[in-house]
Amino acid sequence: MKVKIVQWHAVASWTWDAQDETCGICRMPFDGCCPDCKLPGDDCPLIWGQCNHAFHLHCILKWVNSQTSQAHCPMCRREWHFKD
């Protein structure tokens, strides 16, 4: 018995490799996007801090810029530094 493949449709999915499922600032899922973006993906990446907490790029930038003195992680309150 021989099988001839006439058509083939591949389906793939992706997820961010983060500890949580939602952003600690906007509470939107990481597989979605932040409130400022229309589509998830490369335009709305995740950013990790040295404390290993992850946030949407736009959310953490707004958070850090809104802090008057030192910027702290919204989850653990340690001083915020981007992970290398």
Image (tube, rainbow, N blue to C red):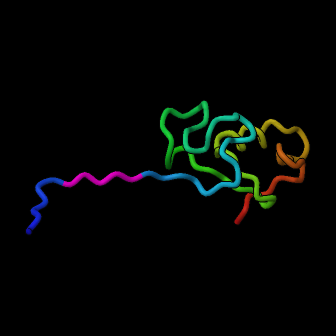
Residue at image x 62%, y 39%?
Answer: 29
Q: How many marks?
A: 0
Q: Position of residue 32 (x, y in %)?
A: 55, 39
Residue at image x 83%, y 48%?
Answer: 73
- In the image, farthest residue toward the front: 1
Q: Is residue 28 above or below residue 53?
A: above
What is the quadrant of the C terminus in the image? Answer: bottom right
**Would you say the magenta stretch is mainly helix, strand or loop?**
loop
Q: Is 76 in the magenta?
A: no
Q: Is 10 in the magenta?
A: yes
What is the quadrant of the N terminus in the image? Answer: bottom left
Q: Viewed as shown, does residue 47 lie left or right of 66?
A: left
61, 42: nearer the viewer: 42
- In the image, farthest residue toward the bottom: 1
Q: Position of residue 58 (x, y in %)?
A: 64, 41
25, 22: nearer the viewer: 22
77, 67: nearer the viewer: 77
Residue at image x 11%, y 64%?
Answer: 3
**Range of the magenta residues?**
8-12
Q: Position of residue 76 (x, y in %)?
A: 87, 49
Q: Viewed as shown, does residue 29 lie left or right of 79?
A: left
Q: Is residue 37 above or below residue 15?
A: above
Q: Position of residue 75 (x, y in %)?
A: 83, 45
